[in-house]
Amino acid sequence: MSHDVMPQGPRAARRGKSSQRKRKRRTGRIILLTLLVLVLAAGGTTYWMYSSIDGNIKGVDLNKALGDDRPQRLPTTGQNLLVLGSDSRAGANASLDGGKVSGARSDTALVVHIPEGRTRATAISIPRDTLVTRPECEKSGGGTAPSKQRVMFNSVYSQFGPACVVKTVEKMSGVRLDHYLEIDFSGFKDLVDAIGGVTVDIEEPIKDGAAGLDLAAGPQKLDGTESLAFVRTRYGVGDGSDLGRIGNQQKFLMALLGEIKRQDLLGSPTKAYTVADSATKALTTDSELDSLTKLSEFAQSMNGVDPNSMETIMLPVAYDKKDPNRVVAAEPNASQLWKAIREDTRIPESAKKSPATGG
């Protein structure tokens, strides 16, 4: 995620069909890392072990930050979550990327819709290079910044933080977000090392000298540092665009969950504690979920959701006519998609098609 090579419109279409197939298998799996934390929090007899790591979870009071000027809640018992994968380069994390990039950015964003009945879920991925209208937001040092059109989606987080990202998504979609879950990708290093590495099936060789990544095709066991480079790389994947890189990030997360399931961590309280400690250190939530008790209660309400049947969709986007290195919401597809989420109804097939697919 460290290399800001911009997507190229003509090249991005080359692998469209392949990319679509891959996304159906991979997209949306980022939420499974948070479900890992929920499972550990609901560990029954070993719960006392986890009470000491409550302080790891960082909370954001969205209700206070956003006020009452928000979309209405779903007319059903369904839930909408914004799951953000952030990539902090501050402090020790900077050394993981050669110290070339400072600050933090949001590199993966998913609106996860859990319909009434809470037995299934749909994850909608918002590409980081999407041009959006940023609403008026509070500045970190005080005061407010006016609304601005045609800003890159991932710049909202780096400039104004999570509350402004939530506000931006709500304004662009008309969807009320019930919860916010942010995962720091840099936190994956310790998490992956805690479980002894993750095996990822590499479909094509990846060589990225800037990230120090040289992977042959086939199953490859990655340690924490290699995993972080894998989810960040742009140069060695498809057309080098954000649309192509999304698949790698989500494929890694699916492999991570699979490894956790394989190891049966709930059967090993000591190792489960180590993994939970690493996972919660990488987690920020809204204030309604910022403890293991709250996460556990939320997990129990979602017990009927089968992550393996999660439907995954990329927000329909098209290459911007003024700048082919950026994308914009494709209409009427995007509006149809958000309308279905707002009304908790079936998403039409036309709303799942994206003119820009990446490679």
Image (cartoon, grey):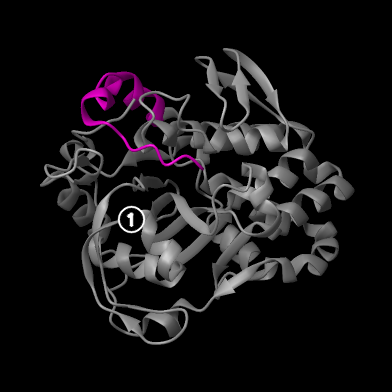
- Determine the image quadrant of residue 67: bottom left
The residue at which mark 1 appears reads as 153
Q: Position of residue 229 (x, y in %)?
A: 60, 35
Quadrant occupied by the C terminus:
top left
Residue pushed farthest right?
A: 270
Q: Residue at x 31, y 29 (%)?
A: 358
Give me the residue at 79% from left, 42% from top.
194
Q: Determine whether the residue tagged by mark 1 lies in a helix, strand or loop.
A: helix
How many neighbours does mark 1 have within 10 angstroms: few (below 14), some (14-19), or many (20 or more)?
many
Observer-nearest of 299 and 354: 354
Residue 115 in view here: no
Residue found at x 62% / y 48%: 99
How far across and down, in percent of the image, does residue 264 sit?
A: 77, 37
Q: Residue at x 52, y 31 (%)?
A: 251
On the rendered structure, is 23 left or right of 215? left
Q: Nearer the viewer, residue 186 or 174?
A: 186
- Front residue of 298/77: it is 298
Horizontal and vertical percent position of residue 221: 70, 23
Q: Residue 9: which quarter of the image?
A: top left
Q: How many marks?
A: 1
Q: Give the amino acid at mark 1.
A: Phe
- Residue segment shown in magenta: 1-24
- Residue 148 on image: x %, y %: 22, 68
Q: Is 69 situated above or below 30?
A: below
Magenta region includes residue 11: yes
Relative to 64, does residue 317 appear above or below in the rendering?
above
Left or right, 317 with respect to 88, comes to left
